[in-house]
Amino acid sequence: MRFLIFRSSEVWISSKDELSFIPHISGMPYALFLCMNKVVSIFVLSVVLVSCAFRGGMKSPLEDEVHIATVNNNVCKRLKDKVILYAIFVDSRYTNPWTEHDIYSSIDSMKLAIEWIEKQARDRQVPLDIELDFHQDAKDIIPIEANLMRQTLSKTLFNSNGVRNVDRWADKVAKTALVIYGRDTSKVTRTKIVPKDRERLLARVRDVHKTDNVALIYFINNYYTDEVSVAIHTAQDHDPEYAVVSFKEPATIAHEFLHLFGALDLYKSPFDKAKQLRKFKSFAMREFPNEIMAFPHRGLDSLGISPLTEYLLGWDRELDEKYSDMITGGKVRVAKY
């Protein structure tokens, strides 16, 4: 089996107001699949990174497989077994300061989100144990201070080099967070982990907790402002994914956490320009009226996880044909894992 991978970058964004739930797309709007010497243009859920599998001897494009790039990808692969939610609280000059109440109430919300996700997994007989860990320095101070380049997350993100500038901020915070772990004293490795960036922090957290799946989430305090929450690099394999959460509602935290493990936004937004995408999201919102990836503004207890999101999270090996056809237009088949 041969694979061609067409790369693009994307960011998934949600805000407090349902009307301003907008996907920010950085990259080309169409994924091109070269199947049996023909090019088929398909819009795949707001420019997810995809690959098209070639198999010798096939005569129909319908026999080819589309691999949705967020599935089983990057650091956060399938959402099962032992998983770490590693939280970092960040203070800045232009966000609300983290008070003790804000910090611990946010931790309580994370625990509620974790309990809800674990219950969803149990109901489907999926083994899942999510452990919460968060940065706290040697003096027991929890927040790290780091200003975003353009004051706020949204101003930084929706500007030139937006994702790159948020990455730089995230790397700066990660470098500070790594200090608490001290020197890497492993005797069996040649290269030691030193404070540098997100990748080094994730490597150290994975080493400490003895697990591969680590969801890195930065928390900034915008509890009453009109800001965004965002998951970045979920469809890439060369830059670790992470999320930045502005609010402490459990549903928002669960929504962004699930993005890191492959889930896609299913709500409509004014930025959905492609007809196929608008059609798909309309279908998803009708088909899944309680889907957390479509209605994250609701109370967590009223929400659930749809068969589509189950597949994206790695909880189901195969996607129902009617959902697969809605994603691809029936031109190609979504891969079975």
Image: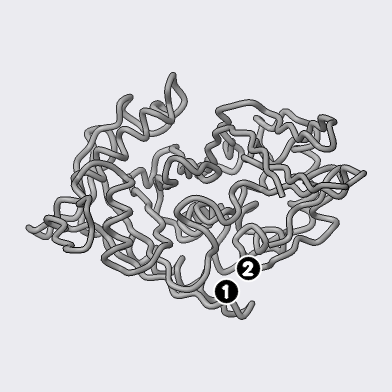
Residue drawn 46% across the image and 65% down it: 113
Residue drawn 23% across the image and 49% down it: 98
Q: Nearer the viewer, mark 1 or mark 2?
A: 2
Name the image quarter holding residue 322.
Answer: bottom right
Q: Secondary structure at mark 2?
A: loop
| Relative depth, front residue between 160 and 336 | 336
| Relative depth, front residue between 1 and 6 | 1
Amino acid on which the number 2 mark rests in the picture = Trp
User: Can you give x and y, in whole percent of width and height, for residue 95 in the image?
Assistant: 29, 38
User: Can you give x and y, in whole percent of width and height, for residue 32 in the image?
Assistant: 73, 31
Whether label 1 touches label 2, CB < 8 Å: yes
Horizontal side of 232 relative to 40 (left or right) equals left
Within-10-Å neighbours for mark 1: few <14, some 14–19, many 20+: some
| Relative depth, front residue between 201 and 266 | 201
Which is more N-terminal, label 2 or label 1? 1
Amino acid on which the number 1 mark rests in the picture = Ala
159 up-or-down from 209: above or below: above
Q: Residue furthest left?
A: 139
Horizontal side of 209 relative to 6 (left or right) equals left
User: Can you give x and y, in whole percent of width and height, for residue 150 in the image?
Assistant: 33, 24
Q: Which residue is mark 2?
A: 315
User: Can you give x and y, in whole percent of width and height, for residue 93 in the image?
Assistant: 22, 33
Q: Secondary structure at mark 1?
A: helix
Name the image quarter holding residue 38.
Answer: top right
Q: Which residue is mark 1?
A: 121
